[in-house]
């Protein structure tokens, strides 16, 4: 009964252009930060092979960004070790360092680099980690993020997220561009750009594709685009609006929202655009579907009871149960990867704020200190929530820790930034 | 060239002053002034364009396009809504009725109802809300006899919303714009 139009568009002009990069400003921090010293890595390679930022700077910025580390100034320290034999522990206890990172960058034949690093416990005078990487010069930032992840995991016991990616929409000079960047906002690349709005990007679970909504056909249509080949398909272009795509955890299906029957309702469709099936049937707005990590349930926003609240229903459809009860306006559910926490936007007397709800107890905590928040998503390790807000009248990205203690602003250098989504740890 | 524009402006102004034709305006319809809306033509521009057209065969009779006549309620093109609501408020009944009557008496006329929301809350929810608002206006004119085939409903959600700091500004963004084909 539905006519499927299945387009395969080769994106010949795929513009992979580095755009205005984001710089990060950390506000606040955890109560107990781990003091760590990171000695600038020694470099024995030609200047053309070396990234602008020393690897140690990138590692330091990552750890600082997490809010869990205090990165100590190392310039005043007499010894500047790069190898284990050069380490004089008393120099590092004297500046109260608990951990020390040292390393080297060396040139290898065939325009490759060898990066070695060690993480040392200053108090126990022992080695915690030692690792070597054989990389191309272009992989320096990525390698620095991986080292930061290893340090983070070793010292906090949780997985790091510095080597993951985020996506967001940047509006600048009247154009919208969907961008993918490293979690620290660097290496921004444009996936697609348009004169008309782009909204609701959603990562495939394996991090190789993005589903998003584009108004380029003068109405909302859902596309799925490969980040590997740049190829894209029209996933859904039915009568009315096509919007709010999110991938099932196994990546085979997407939940989407259509106004085929005049009112926004939730449907499930195969990732190739076949097998459309309606799963919500209400007289109100049903939108913003979000799969539970086990794929069994779909959380969504509905105003079936008056104002918008978050509900849960079986992924195959069926009875919906209300999930949010505090306040008159709760929207945009997103679940942590362990399925225990839900972040969402809650209208409070102080504005629209990022909140988190413990799904077992129903306990709600409002986290953000900003007031026009939208589009929250968990970091893959569930520790931080990335969201969009308005700062100084301009769309900006911000992040807050799930306990509300660490707050960050990701400030861009030009555009109006919105609709962020944090990719999985697999990408 | 200049002279002919001047002539038609004068003609239109004269006619606008004495014409009371087409759909009759309801007395004192409390329609919100939508002159700031980009959809509404300015009187001068209308005069230059297509307001005044001489009916063939009768040099003295002129038909004013009621959709563009600033004295006609049909030139009002925006229906405004309360926050998170999609009910057409009573104060916009006369406006909606006038457009319904126009669609009934002009069965070939086609119209798009463009739903919008203010920038607060989620983009996806606002896209759905804008759609509900455009459908609410459609239902209101359907009841009065306008045909489904004459009406298209779309939503821009909050994508066309302004950067607002107060309720007066937000209020302007919560609206359905009425746009006729070929306008």
Image: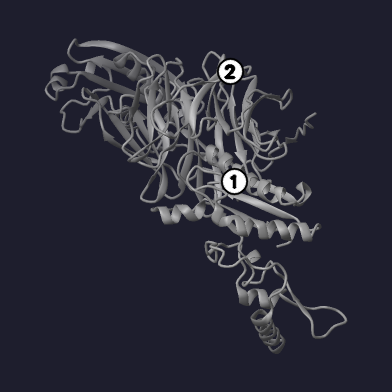
Instruction: Name the side, left or right, on which A91 lies relative to A71.
Output: left
User: What colour-coding does the image apply?
Assistant: one colour
The one nearer the camera, A245 or A426, is A245
Give the image location of residue A356, x and y in percent.
Answer: 38, 25
* Quarter of the rendering occupied by the N terminus of chain B: bottom right
Identify whether B178 is placed above or below B21.
Answer: above
Task: State the residue position of label 2.
Answer: A319
Q: Secondary structure at mark 1?
A: helix
Give the total of numbered labels.
Answer: 2
Q: State the residue position of label 1.
A: B133
Chain containing mark 1: B
Return the residue found at the far front. Answer: B27
Residue at x 47%, y 53% (from the top left corner): B171
Left or right of A287 on screen, residue A92:
left
Quadrant of residue A39 within the rendered picture:
top left
Q: CA distance from mark 1 to mark 2?
A: 27 Å
Report the front residue among A356 and A234. Answer: A356
Q: Is residue A259 above or below residue A416?
A: above
Res B183 quadrant in image: bottom right
């Amino acid at each position: 009964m539905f006519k499927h139009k299945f387009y395969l568009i080769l994106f010949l002009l795929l513009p992979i252009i580095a755009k205005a990069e984001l710089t990060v400003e950390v506000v606040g921090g955890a109560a107990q930060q781990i003091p760590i010293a990171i000695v600038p890595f020694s470099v024995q390679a030609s200047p053309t092979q070396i990234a602008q930022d020393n690897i140690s700077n990138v590692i330091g910025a990552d750890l600082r960004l997490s809010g869990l580390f205090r990165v100590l100034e190392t310039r005043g320290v007499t010894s500047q070790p790069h190898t284990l034999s050069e380490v004089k522990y008393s120099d590092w206890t004297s500046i109260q360092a608990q951990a020390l990172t040292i390393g080297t960058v060396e040139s290898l034949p065939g325009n490759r680099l060898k990066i070695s690093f060690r993480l040392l416990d200053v108090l126990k005078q022992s080695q915690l980690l030692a690792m070597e990487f054989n990389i191309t010069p272009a992989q320096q930032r990525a390698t620095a993020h991986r080292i930061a992840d290893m340090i983070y995991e070793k010292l906090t016991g949780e997985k790091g997220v510095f080597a993951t990616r985020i996506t967001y929409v940047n509006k600048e000079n009247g154009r919208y561009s969907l961008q993918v960047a490293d979690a620290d906002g660097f290496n921004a690349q444009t996936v697609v750009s348009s004169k008309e709005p782009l909204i609701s990007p959603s990562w495939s679970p394996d991090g190789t594709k993005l589903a998003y909504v584009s108004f380029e056909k003068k109405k909302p249509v859902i596309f799925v685009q490969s980040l590997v080949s740049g190829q894209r398909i029209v996933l859904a272009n039915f009568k009315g609006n096509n919007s709010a795509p999110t991938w099932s955890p196994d990546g085979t299906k997407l939940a989407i929202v259509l106004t085929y029957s005049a009112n926004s309702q939730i449907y499930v469709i195969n990732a190739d655009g076949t097998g459309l099936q309606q799963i919500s049937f209400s007289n109100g707005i049903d939108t913003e579907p979000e799969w539970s990590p086990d794929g069994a349930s779909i959380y969504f926003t509905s105003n079936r009871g008056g104002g918008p609240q978050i509900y849960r229903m079986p992924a195959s459809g069926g009875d919906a149960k209300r999930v949010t009860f505090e306040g008159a306006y709760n929207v945009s559910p997103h679940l942590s990867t362990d399925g225990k926490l839900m972040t969402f936007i809650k209208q409070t007397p102080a504005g629209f704020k990022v909140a988190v709800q413990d799904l077992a107890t129903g306990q709600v905590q409002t986290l953000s200190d900003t007031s026009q928040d939208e589009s929250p998503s968990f970091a893959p390790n569930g520790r931080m929530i990335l969201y969009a807000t308005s700062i100084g009248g301009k769309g900006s990205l911000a992040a807050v820790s799930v306990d509300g203690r660490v707050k960050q602003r990701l400030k861009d250098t030009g555009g109006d930034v919105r609709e962020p989504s944090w990719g999985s740890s697999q990408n | 060239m200049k002279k002919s524009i001047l002539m038609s402006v004068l003609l239109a102004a004269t006619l606008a002053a004495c014409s009371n034709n087409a759909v009759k305006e309801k007395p004192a319809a409390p329609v919100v002034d939508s002159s700031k809306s980009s959809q509404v033509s300015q009187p001068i521009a209308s005069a230059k364009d297509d307001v005044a057209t001489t009916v063939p065969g009768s040099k003295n009779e002129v038909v004013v396009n009621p959709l563009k006549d600033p004295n006609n309620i049909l030139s009002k093109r925006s229906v405004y809504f309360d926050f998170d609501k999609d009910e057409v408020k009573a104060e916009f009944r006369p406006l909606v009725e006038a457009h319904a009557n126009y669609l009934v008496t002009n069965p070939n006329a086609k119209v798009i109802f463009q739903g919008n929301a203010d920038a607060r809350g989620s983009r996806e929810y606002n896209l759905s809300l804008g759609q509900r608002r455009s459908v609410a206006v459609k239902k209101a004119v359907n009841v009065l006899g306008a045909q489904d085939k004459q009406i298209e409903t779309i939503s821009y959600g909050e994508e066309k919303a302004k950067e607002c700091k107060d309720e007066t500004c937000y209020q302007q963004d919560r609206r359905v714009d009425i746009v006729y084909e070929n306008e």
